[in-house]
Image (tube, helix red, strand yellow):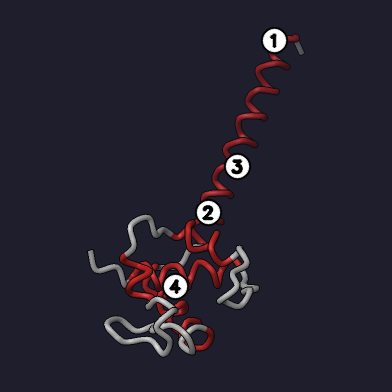
Amino acid sequence: MSRSVRIYAGLAILMALTMLFLVSVVHKAGGASRPAQRTASEGHRLAQAWCQTCHAVEPHMPGLFDQAPSFQAIADRHGTTALSLKVFWRTSHQTMPNLVITPEQADALAAYILSLRSN
């Protein structure tokens, strides 16, 4: 086998492996993601279990404590994004318990809060 044939064969194999890798990444990403509706409903369930002691987790509902903003107010703040919420939850705060949540739970809570956005 000539050197150029080996080079082309090697490139073909490398390209095929790269394509297989990309297909598997896209497939995993598509399979791992869930519809936003389902994720938001999971976040709503988590918010009711963990957060409603201090926050109003339902839209247009007053909270138990005035110093804890409602989820509606958080959602409507300029700059609230899924990323900003996740960063906030990973940061210690004196007036809030330190949350230890999985990335999936953080995604679900963020999806729920953002689903309340009224603007």
- Tell me the residue at 49%/56% (across/down): 83
Q: Are marks 3 and 4 in contact (CB under 8 Å)?
A: no
Question: Depth check: 102 or 19 in front?
Answer: 102
Per the image, the residue denoted by label 1 is: 4
Is the residue marked by circle 4 packed among few (<14), some (14-19), or many (20+) residues within 10 Å? Answer: many
User: Label 1 vs label 3: CA separation?
Assistant: 24 Å
Q: Are marks 1 and 3 in contact (CB under 8 Å)?
A: no
Per the image, the residue denoted by label 3 is: 20
- Tell me the residue at 32%/87% (across/down): 62
User: Label 1 vs label 4: CA separation?
Assistant: 52 Å
Mark 2 or mark 3, earlier in chain: 3
Per the image, the residue denoted by label 2 is: 27
Q: Which of the two marks, 4 or 2, is nearer to us in this view?
A: 4
Q: Which of the two marks, 3 or 4, is nearer to us in this view?
A: 4
Up the image or down, 115 lies above or below 8; here it is below
Image coordinates for residue 71, horizontal then vertical, percent:
38, 75
Q: Which mark is residue 39?
A: 4
Q: Which of the two marks, 1 or 3, is nearer to us in this view?
A: 3
Mark 1 or mark 4, earlier in chain: 1
